[in-house]
Image (cartoon, grey):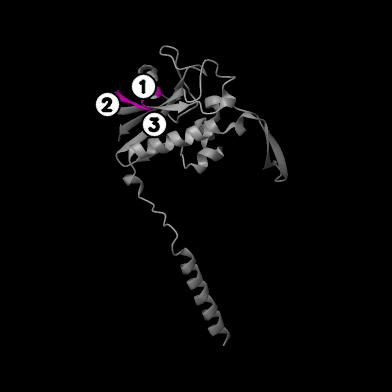
Amino acid sequence: MQVRTYLAIGAWAVLAVALAQQGQPRRIVRPIHQISPQERMDSLQTGIQAALDDLSMTKMQVVPGIDAKGRPTTYCVSPTFGLRRIPSVGVLHNGVLRQAGTPIFFETKGWVLEYFAVSSLGKPLAPGKMIVHKNVGPFAVSASAKESKEILAFADRACSAVGAKGSYKGEIDGSSVEARPLRLSKPECLPCHQGSKIGDPMAVLVCLVRKR
């Protein structure tokens, strides 16, 4: 009798779950090889822009943690500004980027997406005054001097285009490359970014798609 009762309860539970799921949108997960480089760039740009928009990271924060002996404790996290909020070594610890599903780099069959951030150090974008940020992008640190110059030259050409059109495309050493804007989005940022206005591109995200 007890066995029948348990089976009946189990059957009702399964039915209840099935009914609850009816009408809910199903999440379609595509194989990674079906996701295009363009979709990866969109995800990367969205995630990094979200991190830059998160002004909570510009304030000192006290976060919970565990000390060396396994006891609960708290840690002070220093405020960070600009592109320093998104170093590649900290991407996995950045809640905004993690929620946006932005991994450190993207690789799939046939191609790999590498990315770099280029800016004029908080000033309006200006050709000849741009630098490649060494802490943004998994390959930025190991980029050759020749490639860094090519990335800078490409970003220089993209300065005006990313502001007006939103992107700029080209080629570097046989690899397709695209520049995307990272924009100033909040009035709280204006005191530190003099000479700029809301919507101005403050950095260029340079994405290279290399064939494997």
What are the residue bounds of the magenta stretch?
163-173
Give SS at disc 1.
helix
Q: Amino acid at mark 3?
A: Glu
Q: Which residue is mark 3?
A: 114
In the rendered structure, find residue 106 and report the number of the disc placed on it. Answer: none
Q: Position of residue 126 (x, y in %)?
A: 43, 14
Question: Where does label 2 land, which residue?
Answer: 174
x, y percent for residue 146:
36, 17
Q: Is residue 169 magenta?
A: yes
Of callouts 1 and 2, the N-terminal one: 1
Instruction: Please tell me whether mark 3 sits on a helix, a strand or a loop.
Output: strand
81 w.r.t. 131: above or below: below
Q: Which residue is mark 1?
A: 161
Q: Is residue 60 above or below residue 192?
A: below
Q: Is residue 155 visible?
A: no
Q: Mark 3–mark 2 contact, CB under 8 Å?
A: no
Q: Earlier in the sequence, mark 3 or mark 1?
A: 3
Location of the C terminus by quadrant is top left
Mark 1 surroundings: few (<14), some (14-19) or many (≥20) residues within 10 A: some
- Whether 34 is drawn above or below 89: the answer is below
- Using the numbered discs, state the Cα–Cα distance from disc 3 to disc 2 in whole angstroms: 14 Å
Residue 174 place in picture, x, y as percent: 27, 26
Q: CA distance from mark 3 to mark 1?
A: 21 Å
Q: Nearer the viewer, mark 1 or mark 2?
A: 1
- Given residues 180 and 139, the one toward you in this image is 180
Total numbered labels: 3
Horizontal relation, residue 66 to residue 6: left or right = right
State the quadrant of the N terminus: bottom right
Q: Position of residue 24 (x, y in %)?
A: 45, 59
Residue shown at the point (60%, 27%) measured from the top left = 80
Identified by mark 1, the residue type is Ala
State if disc 2 and disc 1 touch (CB < 8 Å).
Answer: no
